[in-house]
Image (tube, coloured by chain):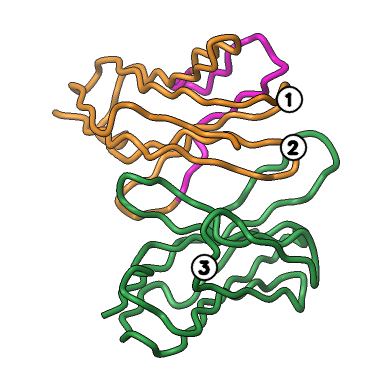
Chain colours: A green, B orange
Amino acid sequence: EAQVTQNPRYLITVTGKKLTVTCSQNMNHEYMSWYRQDPGLGLRQIYYSMNVEVTDKGDVPEGYKVSRKEKRNFPLILESPSPNQTSLYFCASSFLGLAGYNEQFFGPGTRLTVL
Amino acid sequence: AQTVTQSQPEMSVQEAETVTLSCTYDTSENNYYLFWYKQPPSRQMILVIRQEAYKQQNATENRFSVNFQKAAKSFSLKISDSQLGDTAMYFCAFMKGNNDMRFGAGTRLTVKP
């Protein structure tokens, strides 16, 4: 089954304790991205990746890191989480065409609470 | 930068009635895509309908249809014969060809029995 998986689905942590949220897709997609969803703000892009070893900042990258060592995985790293990073996080992936539409497939979301 | 505005934070509709959710966007691009996503309580993002900007015909998917006004930069979603399962948060989204996607703040729709 074609899917995007995220782990963990729920996480409660404390300020300053490093954490990683994993994202994996089995569709051989080149493009992957991370979003955070906050009430009244919709989804905002944190980082995206066009392919292996190619990453770039989205609209709200502060406090986050990413890596793309393998095509299927795109982990989101919070080196020193703070309470303002409490949010719902989504990973998404798609093919990367030069033209035309490429549907983005979303993971199930990760609810993160930083105390 | 592209922006997407959903001016209705919350809406409600009676079961079997019709409801329209509004969305406006701002862009200088000529070629782009517009989407409506549904997010039920499970939080999964579900694609409801999409519209290619180069197509003049409004997209339709069963009970869901859009009114795409390119000149006015408006992209509303009409849900006909509303069902209880339509209760969800709805997000309007804009995407350029390079996969850069922007979302609106969302409209919480409640379908009442």
Q: Is residue A1 visible?
A: no
Amino acid at dot 1:
Asn
The span picked out in magenta is: B45-65
Q: Circle 2: is it few (<14), some (14-19), or many (20+) Cα within 10 Å?
A: some
Q: Is residue B67 left or right of residue A94?
A: left
What chain does mark 3 sit on?
A: A
| Front-lying residue, A85 or A68 | A85
**Which amino acid lies under the numbered mark 3 shown in the image of this protein?**
Glu
- Tag 1 residue: B31
Quadrant of residue B35 within the rendered picture: top right
Chain on which label 2 sits: B
Q: Do discs 1 and 2 belong to a common subunit?
A: yes
Q: Which residue is mark 3?
A: A62
Where residue B77 appears, x then y in whole percent? 43, 21
Residue highlighted by disc 2:
B97
SS under mark 2: loop
Residue A65: percent from left, percent from top: 59, 75
Give the quadrant of the C terminus of chain B: top left
